[in-house]
Image (spheres, coloured by chain):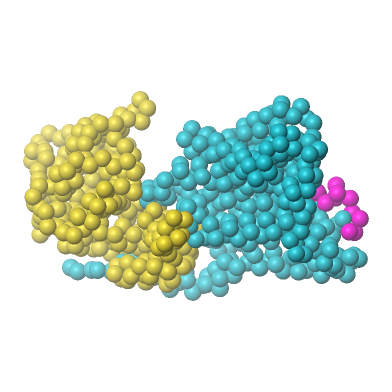
Amino acid sequence: MISQELNNLSDSPSSRKNGPLLRMVNISKNFGAVQALKNVDLELDHDEILGLVGDNAAGKSTLMKILAGVLRPDGGQIFFEDKLVHYKSPREARGLGIEMVYQDFALCKNMWIAGNIFMAREIIQGKLGKALKVLDKKQMMDKSQKILEKQKVSIGSCKNRAGELSGGQQQSVAIARALGFNARVVIMDEPTASLGVKQASRLLEIARTLPGKGISVVYITHRMQDIFTLCNRVIVLKTGEKVGDFRIQDVTIDEIVRLMILGKQENPPVTNTIFIRGRSDS
Amino acid sequence: MEVNSTSDLHDSEQTSSTQSFKLLRVFAKIQGNVVLIIAIIVLSTVLAFATEGFFTTYNLINVLRQISLTSLMAIGFGIAVISGGMDISMGNVAAMVGMTVAGLFAVFKVNLGISIILSLTLGLGMGLINGAVIAYLGVPPFIATLAMMFISQGLTFEFTQGYPIYEGLTSNFLFIGQGYIGPLPVPVIIMIIMFIFAHLFLNNTVLGQHIYAIGGNETAARVTGVDVNRVKLITFGISGFFAALTGVVMTARLGSAQPAAAGMDFFLTAATAAVLGGTELSGGVGNMLGILLGSLFLGILNNGLTLLKISSYFQWIVTGILLILAIVWHTTQKSSVGGKS
């Protein structure tokens, strides 16, 4: 059913633009006695880059892991193109086109590159192979090569192990994996944390091109300058609660930092929860 | 600004890293098995000159027959370890299944085929219980399988009161352990078939790939959508099955079912073969050819030392030293090329 939904979605990646692409409503999550998220709302529009910031333990990663299907919320609902969705695993979230690029790239370094790109969505041989779930390695290789070429990534043969690649190359594979299968939403969790200055700026430029391809981005970072050079909007979390949701042109770095630390500010620049259609050209 | 390429992300690294370590990485890919093959050739050559009768067909087939049982267990152990797990209950599960098949067939006069199927299913079931405890209750594999080791040993001795079963094991059953098909003993044929099966399974099926994936990086596998718990469950089912197969063949080979036939010593020999063959206890790395070669090396060494009339106690010392050397060698290789190889 999810894959059917994906097919429907992928037929017209950005054709349905009435209402936000994604809504998370009243999301709560507890880890034992610790309440990691308290009734958090999040909206992501079509072709939007949304920054998600907060101090350590603010709940950013927990919220995004819920969106990516890695964690299940204790309360709340997720709407994808105004349809209530209940996914129970990352596989189902990926089926909807929700992908995540992890800070540590989430690659199995002991495995071949094509195996990583097609992890959990392997291509199966026909006939007998289907029953035994026999891999169609050749197709996986060819398609991986094409996915990487499409992203203009050159890393040699997809037969090589991911662990043989440099850090930058590994991230290229992680990004190619996220973008290679009709992605609609890409969550980037501290993507520049382990990159050098030049590579980080290149990554920002790649992220900037995604809305033009019908992909919305949620960008988690501690680097305020990245938020202001890349994002249309920013949401601030503080100890599991949403304390701010601003158009980027309506807020300053100082105000966001104050919110991240104190959870409030004396003169809020705009009222919370502003929906934006399309990207600003700032 | 328009940038459509991620290639710049790694431009500088690509030129420096791939060039300087290229040869080393190529060597690292093949070194494990190649080193073992060279070691086997050197050892065999030395033994051919140092002993009488090593290089005879009879003796070489004898070596294969000797390693067949430990190899069957090493296959299952290897698969569990590749997944990042550990199954130390295999020896005792093998003993329990060995007693079960003999009990069903010889004592309760159950049809041979059904006895074998039920016994293998028992081993599979014990393995699945291990897998369920590990995957769904979160018990570490070492502890879960240690508990299963005690449980299976207790069950075996409780039901048999420590007595072996040797009457009623007719020739059609004994054929599994003592028969020949052409020049090859049946256990050797079973071993070869299982090695091929396990190799194809690990390298060519989705489940095989996922076993490597969770052994290499369980979190990455989980967040990309691999059903890690299911993979663990099945993996330990597989190691239980191989323990059971070892038990059945062992009972047929010995001509009697012994409650202590496949205890910790036997299991540790199988584990040693897997580790010598390059299976990393940290998970994610290992292959069936390596395990076969590790098993073969160990078998030839023990056979040679026996032919040289060196005591079995000394063979243990040699095995221990070899194990350390293998681990040190592997660790050195890994640190020289970086990451898992």
Which shade is chain A? yellow
User: In the image, is residue B302 above or below residue B60?
Assistant: above
Residue occupying the point 23% across, 68% down: B3
Can residue B33 be seen in this snapshot? yes
Q: Please tell me in which quadrant of the rendered image residue B67 appears.
A: bottom right
Q: In screen coordinates, is A131 left or right of A207?
A: right
Instruction: Give the x, y percent position of residue A239.
Output: 27, 33
Instruction: Give the x, y percent position of residue A81.
Output: 15, 47
Which contiguous range is marked in magenta?
Answer: B307-317
Query: Which quarter of the figure is the C terminus of chain B placed in?
Result: bottom right
Q: In screen coordinates, is B7 left or right of A112?
A: left
Q: In screen coordinates, is A44 left or right of B303?
A: left
User: In the image, is residue A154 above or below residue A193?
Assistant: below
Query: Which quarter of the figure is the N terminus of chain B placed in?
Result: bottom left
Q: In screen coordinates, is B257 left or right of A48?
A: right
Which shade is chain B? cyan
Residue occupying the point 65% across, 57% down: B291
Instruction: Give the x, y percent position of residue A238.
Output: 24, 35
Front-most of residues A16 and B119: B119
Residue occupying the point 79% across, 59% down: B63
Residue occupying the point 52% across, 72% down: B22
Q: Please tell me in which quadrant of the rendered image residue B151 appears.
A: top right
Instruction: Give the x, y percent position of residue B208.
Output: 50, 54
Does B1 appear in magenta? no
